[in-house]
């Protein structure tokens, strides 16, 4: 049956544009500035001009930040209920004007009206409703947190209004004020949203919108008045933002690119999987960060599945996005079309088979037909690069382990789909796939209650749900941190230190490194002298170098079984370490006293034992959540270990600082490569024997002594380390770690120059610390269907 055209009217949207003279200034402090230097906003479906927008200047960004700063205390003081009422009003107004928003979005972006009307707008409203709820509950549910302050938010063009909602709703709910930049291709719905903010009673300065290209983004990123940055866009720009904000103390969340696998097993409902694939790769012309752009299909059903897929592709309709019967609309801009065509042409030239259904491509605008590529090697550009277009690359696998290996064979880790009727197989695959979101027998599902975000180079931080709220808050304990590292009380310890040096430890002993559960000589065969507080020599420690770190990382990777051990078992090992440390408490106290002159060294040992108990207690209690989105399913949000973490420990409290960082990391299943206090490393090297007698598997904790700066640099640039923590009080060192982490987009947790009271459980414990040691995976599972 053929359908006739069913165009959606653009009358209201055109009238709205006319009403604004088709020219927009900036929205700052609830006022529209006069238009400045202008650039055109084009309808990509027919290349017609829709309106002119203002390229904001650095001075405009300044004004926006100042307005946001001035408004923040008042917005906070409105309280949860005050903010909830305004956000609820926003949600209602978004619903009321949903059709106008949907048409405007389709005109501006080129995506089909079916999608803007049925997907984007309902999700936008749902986001504001859901987060109005978090505003209401904030004081109760996040009592130990406060708003971060002023947040800068930069979004791409693929879901202009939905990305706005994802960013602005949680920020507002938590009590922040906002400087928001839409993408230069698609700013119009943000302009309409600004008007809705005024109608909803959002106080002046709470939401400020500045338009323009990447230069405006840079001005936001580098502005000293911004406390937190949230970015969605390309991995390349994400990397630049990480570098540009290193050392600034700004909180950062990055939602970047992907090359997500869509895995079809031979027992899957193949017809349903084909429909899932349509939603996965041809939704929004494939301009979706979590698009299922790599089809991995089990060899035994490959031909059958691809035949069904080609037949389905033949039926996809491409044409005017305003036509309600169209499946595929326009790309955002001719520049994207050229990029996509270039990648597909290169695949063709390399001998791949390219299938495109015969469809009529409109004469004007930016278009690309649905495309299936077969015969590509796993390392081909089309199999590795984010194409961000309607292009699917298909490959086959034989066994589930091969599927896992192929699924994880990119630098990304945003999302994955698993299709099988075998629940055991699906739930066996989910934990093995490195991705922040896993959809089982479904695809591209999103909800305000569920966290979304990546692993690896797909970025960090989560948007949506409880986990997303934390991105816009600061733990109150952070405010209580001392201005400089806490120094131990020194004094009488001298006598004790001498006693310890002479009594407990052999003077000529050289502590080795600890790699893979064994003591290892440093590769360079150098060592450094460690002197006590009275200047007398205590012992030597190995001078670790790049090669030692490499060996330690290898050992840590081999100890992957630790991540799969039960939380109960990990807790047992931590308790056992505490028990063995307690048995040698006097010796450890004497050592601390000798190194630091701390007269309360016994207190530090006791606090370390307690901290081990504390994280042993948490090991099996840092549970995930089961979200209940409005679909026939549940979303299980699991806290997974990050992998291998490099840790640079503080100099103050050399034992307690070490334990306070290593214990939470390993409690949740990470393996660590630790650089102990550079000045006082012997408490860590004395732990080797404690570890050896505590059932800690080799490779879970690896210790490399030496120069903190040099070793931190190596940790931050090592491609097989997933996160780096640095807490030795070096502001420059912390900034360097953040900057260098950009190369492979490692997660970082740095203390900067500010100290931390390691004795305080509020500052060295709690969920905020465990969150640094984990990343949330949201697994969508059909349930109660
Ligand atoms: P982009 O990452 O350059 O742009 C995203 C946003 O960042 C825009 O608002 C832009 O103005 C801003 N921006 C650009 N340079 C900046 C800088 N130096 N500092 C701060 N902000 C900056 O993405 P673009 O150029 O629009 O698309 C290029 C490719 O990026 C796409 O083909 C696709 O592969 C990928 N992409 C991925 C997205 C995702 O959600 N994963 C979204 C958009 C693009």
Image (tube, rainbow, N blue to C red):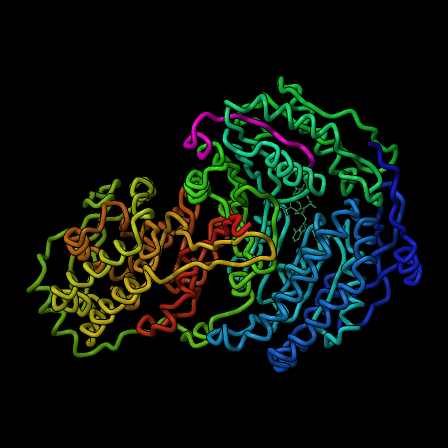
Residue appearing at x 62%, y 67% in the figure: 131
Residue extending farthest to the top is 351
Asked if the magenta segment contains residue 393, the reply would be yes
| Residue 262 spot, x, y in % from top left | 56, 36
Asked if the magenta segment contains residue 139, the reply would be no
Q: Is residue 88 above or below residue 546?
A: below
As drawn, is 439 to the left or to the right of 117?
A: left
As drawn, is 151 to the left or to the right of 520?
A: right
Residue closest to the eye, 753 or 471? 471
Range of the magenta residues? 389-404
Q: Is residue 248 visible?
A: yes
Asked where in the image residue 289 lies, by quadrant, the reply is top right
Residue extending farthest to the left is 503
Residue appearing at x 73%, y 56% in the figure: 121
Residue closest to the eye, 708 or 67? 67
| Residue 507 spot, x, y in % from top left | 10, 57
Quarter of the figure with the N terminus? top right
Q: Is residue 209 above or below residue 669?
A: below
Residue closest to the eye, 46 or 335? 46
Asked where in the image residue 487 lies, by quadrant, the reply is bottom left
Total labels drawn: 0
Q: Is residue 267 above or below residue 375?
A: below
| Residue 18 spot, x, y in % from top left | 93, 59
Residue appearing at x 73%, y 72% in the figure: 89
| Residue 29 spot, x, y in % from top left | 75, 73
Q: Is residue 243 visible?
A: no
Residue closest to the eye, 715 or 130? 130
């Amino acid at each position: 049956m053929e359908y006739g055209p069913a165009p959606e009217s653009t009358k209201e949207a055109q009238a709205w544009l006319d009403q604004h003279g088709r020219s927009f200034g900036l929205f700052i402090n609830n006022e529209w500035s006069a238009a400045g230097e202008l650039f055109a906003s084009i309808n990509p479906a027919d290349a017609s001009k829709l309106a002119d927008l203002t390229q904001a200047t650095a001075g405009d960004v300044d004004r926006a930040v100042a307005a946001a700063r001035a408004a923040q205390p008042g917005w906070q003081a409105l309280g949860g209920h005050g903010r909830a009422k305004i956000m609820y009003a926003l949600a209602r107004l978004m619903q009321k004007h949903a059709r106008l928003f949907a048409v405007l979005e389709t005109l501006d972006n080129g995506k089909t009206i079916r999608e803007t009307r049925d997907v984007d707008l309902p999700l936008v409203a749902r986001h504001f409703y859901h987060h109005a709820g978090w505003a209401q509950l904030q004081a109760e549910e996040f009592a130990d947190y406060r708003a971060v302050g002023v947040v800068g938010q930069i979004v791409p063009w693929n879901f202009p209004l939905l990305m706005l909602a994802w960013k602005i709703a949680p920020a507002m709910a938590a009590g922040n004020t906002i400087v928001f930049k839409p993408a230069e291709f698609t700013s119009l719905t943000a302009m309409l949203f600004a008007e809705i903010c005024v109608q909803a009673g959002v106080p002046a300065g709470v939401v400020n919108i500045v338009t323009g290209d990447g230069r405006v983004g840079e001005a936001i990123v580098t502005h000293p008045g911004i406390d937190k940055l949230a970015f969605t866009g390309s991995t390349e720009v994400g990397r630049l933002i990480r570098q540009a904000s290193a050392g600034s103390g700004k909180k950062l969340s990055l939602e970047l690119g992907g090359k997500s696998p869509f895995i079809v097993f031979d027992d899957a409902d193949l017809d349903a999987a084909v429909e899932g694939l349509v939603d996965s790769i041809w939704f929004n012309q494939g301009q979706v960060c979590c698009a299922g752009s790599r089809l991995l299909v089990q060899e035994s059903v490959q031909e059958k599945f691809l035949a069904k897929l080609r037949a389905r592709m033949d039926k996809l309709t491409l044409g005017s996005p305003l036509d309600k019967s169209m499946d595929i609309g326009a790309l955002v801009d001719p520049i994207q079309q050229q990029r996509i065509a270039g990648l597909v042409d290169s695949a063709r030239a390399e001998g791949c088979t390219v299938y495109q259904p015969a469809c009529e491509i409109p004469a004007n605008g930016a278009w690309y037909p649905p495309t299936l590529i077969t015969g590509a090697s796993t390392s081909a550009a089309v199999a590795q690069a984010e194409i961000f277009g309607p292009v699917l690359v298909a490959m086959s696998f034989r066994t589930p382990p091969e599927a896992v290996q192929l699924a994880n064979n990119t630098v990304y880790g945003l999302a994955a789909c698993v299709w099988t009727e075998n629940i055991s197989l699906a739930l066996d695959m989910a934990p093995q796939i490195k991705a922040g979101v896993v959809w089982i027998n479904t695809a591209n599902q999103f909800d305000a209650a569920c966290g979304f975000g990546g692993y690896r180079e797909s970025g960090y931080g989560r948007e949506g749900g409880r986990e997303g709220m934390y991105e816009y808050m600061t733990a109150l304990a952070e405010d209580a941190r001392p201005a400089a590292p806490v120094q131990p009380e020194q004094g009488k310890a001298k006598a004790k230190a001498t006693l310890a040096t002479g009594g407990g430890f052999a003077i000529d002993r050289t502590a080795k490194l600890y790699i893979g559960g064994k003591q290892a000589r440093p590769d360079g065969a150098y060592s450094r002298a460690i002197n006590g507080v009275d200047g007398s020599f205590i012992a030597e420690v190995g001078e670790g170098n790049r090669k030692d770190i490499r060996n330690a990382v290898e050992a840590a990777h081999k100890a992957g079984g630790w991540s799969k051990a039960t939380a109960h078992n990990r807790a047992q090992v931590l308790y056992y370490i505490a028990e063995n440390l307690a048995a040698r408490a006097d010796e450890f106290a004497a050592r601390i006293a000798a190194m630091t002159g701390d007269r309360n060294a016994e207190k530090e040992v006791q606090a370390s034992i307690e901290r081990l108990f504390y994280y042993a207690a948490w090991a099996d209690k840092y549970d995930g959540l089961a979200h209940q989105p409005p679909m026939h399913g549940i979303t299980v949000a699991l806290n997974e270990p990050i992998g291998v973490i490099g840790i640079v420990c503080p100099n103050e409290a050399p034992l307690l600082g070490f334990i306070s960082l290593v214990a939470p990391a390993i409690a949740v299943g990470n393996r660590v490569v630790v650089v102990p206090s550079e000045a006082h490393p012997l408490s860590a090297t004395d732990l080797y024997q404690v570890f050896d007698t505590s059932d800690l598997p080799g490779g879970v904790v690896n210790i490399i002594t030496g120069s903190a700066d040099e070793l931190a640099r190596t940790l931050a640039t090592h491609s097989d380390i997933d996160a780096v923590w640095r807490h030795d009080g070096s502001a420059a060192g912390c900034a360097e770690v953040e900057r260098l982490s950009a190369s492979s987009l490692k997660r970082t947790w740095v203390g900067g120059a500010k100290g931390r009271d390691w004795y305080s459980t509020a500052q060295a414990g709690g969920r905020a610390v465990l969150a640094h040691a984990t990343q949330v995976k949201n697994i969508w599972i059909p349930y109660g269907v």
